[in-house]
Amino acid sequence: MRAAILSLVCLLQQPHILNGRLDTQAAGPNLAATFQRIVAAQTEPAWIGYSVPALSSSGADRRQCCGDMWISDGIVISNGRVAGCGLEPADRNARAPEGQPRTLQSPIRLEGPDTMIVLYRVEEKTVQKVRVFSPDCELDAGGRAIHWLEGVPPADSVKLLSSLATGTTDRVRSAAMAALAMHREDVAVPALLALAKQDPNTKVRGDALFWLAETAGRKVVPEITAAIENDPDTDVKKRAVFALSQLPKDEGVPLLINVAKTNRNPAVRKQAMFWLGQSKDPRALDFFTQILAK
């Protein structure tokens, strides 16, 4: 009975793949080693993927599909027609033939999913793309193989994405950082904090601060304000100010006013005032009135 239940759970976690070859295997005790072995063995473009628990959305809908409007079972509505989500560039919106009904693979969900699918496109033995999807999104693989890894621990996924967030191309770095931030808070926040504090790349530090604000909010305010004060790079300081602007107004506006009043760096003060102006908050208006009255 236990084996049957485990098999059913694994099956439910697998993606809904159309037009692709699904190769399922265990992630093993070392995700990085398994991942690199698959990458090194590829002689043509392919995808590697797995499922992990996703960040709790506190009621918000964090479903991810093609970037179009879509129903929660993964059916995309594009120009009035039903479309699956194409992974390959040529079939980004893979449509059902005219007049042919699409069979729904799962019931329509009213609540957001508690897991997500992370997919890596591998070509020329390197990771070229990182994409995140909800588990009920139908994916058209364009005839490519998808190597599906079962039993991936969330912490191992975060380590893999952290390694991609600090290297490769800007496109892969940004996508890896976003995917990392969508993991459960208990594994994502420590990794984002490490990147924000320690990475030598200023863009990585700035992006990590932004995603910290999106992921953990008030819990990481001390780290964000510390970056504004102590990071040696002005661009990182400005990104940290932007991160404050993404907090709920009751939390972010007073912090921005304090930065605008007290920070020694004129570029940082200017950035804080810009985002205060964008907030349209009465407290920001009062602050500007006080400045003009002097």
Image (cartoon, rainbow, N blue to C red):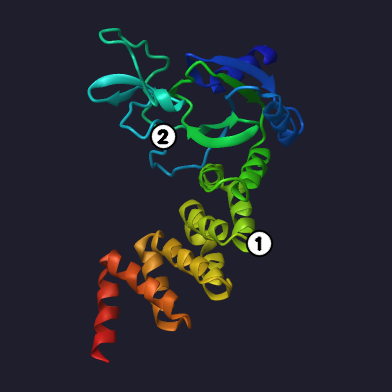
- The residue lying toward the viewer, choosing from 273 and 234, is 234
Q: Quadrant of residue 200?
A: bottom right
Q: Quadrant of residue 101?
A: top left
Toward the top, the furthest residue is 100
How far from the left and from the top, in percent, is residue 79? 23, 25
Q: Amino acid at mark 1?
A: Gln
- Which circle marks residue 94 in the picture? none
* Pointer 2 local density, CA inside 10 Å: few below 14, some 14–19, many at least 20: many
Q: Residue at x 58, y 71 (%)?
A: 231
How far apart marks 1 and 2 lie (CA) works out to: 31 Å
Image point (36%, 65%), residue name: 250
When the figure is inspected, residue 243 is found, relative to residue 39, above or below; the finding is below
Q: What amino acid is at disc 2?
A: Arg
Q: Say which residue appears at 24% left-offset and 86% top-offset.
A: 292
- Front disc: 1 or 2: 1
Q: Where is residue 2 shown, x and y percent of the image?
A: 68, 15
Q: Position of residue 1 (x, y in %)?
A: 67, 11
Whichever of labels 1 and 2 marks the residue nearer the N terminus, that label is 2
Query: Tag 2, which secondary structure?
Result: loop
Q: Secondary structure at mark 1?
A: helix
Q: State the residue position of label 1.
A: 198
Give the left or right position of residue 150, taking residue 58 as reference.
right
In the image, taking residue 208 as reference, residue 57 lies left or right, namely left
Q: Percent position (x, y) of residue 236?
A: 52, 66
Q: Identify the residue under disc 2.
A: 63
Image quadrant holding the C terminus, namely bottom left
Characterize the local packing of mark 1: few (<14), some (14-19) or many (20 or more) Cα atoms within 10 angstroms: few
Instruction: Please say if 48 is above or below 226.
Output: above
Residue at image location 42% in from the left, 34% down from the top: 64
Q: Residue furthest bottom?
A: 294
State whether residue 283 is above or below residue 188.
below
Left or right of residue 161: residue 292 = left
